[in-house]
Image (cartoon, helix red, strand yellow):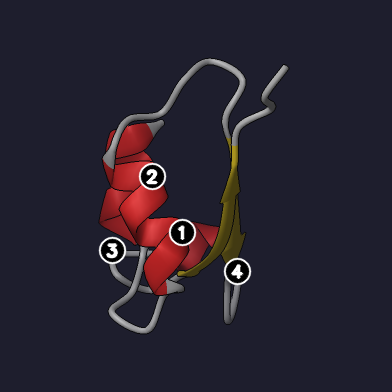
Amino acid sequence: MLDTVLRLASRDSDTDAMMDVSGGFPTSGIAVLEVPGDWAELDGGDARLVDFEVPRG
């Protein structure tokens, strides 16, 4: 999942979310990507990472 998110995330992604996701992607992690068109048309750097969350106990 980490490789997929980093490949799809555009330069205008949320800075905090990018910093959080670059530290690793645990099994329970959730990445929220905004996609301007259809998922099938994504080529890399097309989606905007808007949030990354990891449940903390």
Residue 29 vs residue 42: left or right?
Answer: right
Give the amino acid type for the residue marked by disc 3 in the picture.
Gly
Q: Are marks 1 and 4 in contact (CB under 8 Å)?
A: no
Q: In this view, does 3 lie above or below 39?
A: above
The disc, 3 or 1, on the residue closer to the chain's N-terminal end is 1
**Residue with the mark numbered 1:** 17
* Disc 3 to disc 2, C-alpha distance: 17 Å
Q: Within 10 Å of the Cα at label 1, are there few (<14), some (14-19), or many (20+) other Cα atoms?
A: some
Q: Which of 10 and 54 is in front in this view?
A: 54
Mark 1–mark 4 distance (CA, rounded to whole Å): 22 Å
Q: Gap in Å between the C-alphas at discs 2 and 4?
A: 23 Å
Q: Tell me which residue sits at (51%, 58%) in the image.
A: 40
Q: Earlier in the sequence, mark 4 or mark 3?
A: 4
Sequence-wise first label, 1 or 4: 1
Q: Which residue is drawn at 46% across and 59% down?
A: 17
Q: Which one is closest to the eye, mark 3 or mark 2?
A: 2
Residue 20's spot in the image, x, y percent? 40, 48
The residue beneath circle 4 is 38
Mark 4 Cα within 10 Å, few/some/many (few <14, many 20+)? few
Please state which amino acid type lies under the numbered disc 2.
Val
- Is disc 3 placed on a helix, strand or loop? loop
User: Identity of the amino acid at label 4?
Assistant: Asp
Secondary element at tag 2: helix
Residue 5, can we see it? no
Q: How far apart are marks 3 and 1 (CA)?
A: 17 Å
- Give residue 44's mark: 3
Q: Are the residues flagged by discs 2 and 1 in contact, CB closer than 8 Å?
A: yes
Q: Where is residue 7 in the image (x, y as percent from the top left)?
A: 26, 53
Q: Badge 2 is on which residue?
A: 21
Residue closest to the eye, 12 or 34: 12
Of label 3 and label 2, which has the lower sequence position? 2
22 on left or right of 18: left
